[in-house]
Amino acid sequence: MASERPASPLGFGSGTSVDHHDGVRWVDYTNISWNPVFCKRCDICVEICPKNTLVLRNDAIIEEQDCILCGLCERYCPDLAIEMLPAAVAAHEVRTAAGKDTAAADEPR
């Protein structure tokens, strides 16, 4: 019998977020990471999203387009099953800062 080890302790391999090394499967989307094990499908994140970006489909939370990275889904999730991806948040902050810098340059003095 071969002694091959799975890619993660639970054998999920692909789909495990690179930011989570706890062996629990996290599904990375564009802006969020979602944990199907922790999530009890209460729909709080779906209801609180101001842009209706999150949907519950086929027993999974799906991130669709137009996320504004407000972080309400992460903040209000009672099960800690959603996290904002640090890279997405950092990129959003850079875009926002660049937008404010150009807006400030365009204002008359």
Image (spheres, rainbow, N blue to C red):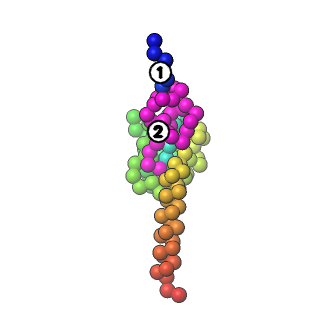
Within 10 Å of the Cα at label 2, are there few (<14), some (14-19), or many (20+) other Cα atoms?
A: some
Q: Where is mark 1, residue-wise?
A: 4
Say if residue 34 shows up in the picture.
no
- Give coordinates of residue 22: x percent, y percent: 58, 33
Q: Which mark is residue 108?
A: none
**Residue 27: assigned label:** 2
Determine the residue positioned at 49% across, 69% down: 98
Say if the magenta span includes residue 100: no
In percent of width and height, residue 21 lies at: 56, 36
Q: Is residue 68 visible?
A: yes
For the residue labelled by badge 1, is the local secondary structure a helix, a strand or a loop? loop
Judge by depth and name the residue closer to the eye, 60 or 34.
Answer: 34
Residue positioned most to the front = 2
The percent position of residue 68, horizontal first and vertical second, equals 47, 57
Please state the horizontal and vertical placement of residue 72, each as a whole percent of the image: 55, 51
Q: What residue appears at the point 40 percent right and 38 percent down from the top-left corner?
A: 57
Residue range in magenta is 7-31
Q: Work out which residue is located at the far bottom of the displayed protein and give it.
A: 109
Q: Looking at the magenta stretch, what is its main secondary structure?
A: loop
Q: Is residue 9 above or below residue 66?
A: above
Q: Is residue 58 left or right of residue 94?
A: left
Seen in the picture, residue 1 relative to 106 is either above or below; the reply is: above
Q: Secondary structure at mark 2?
A: strand
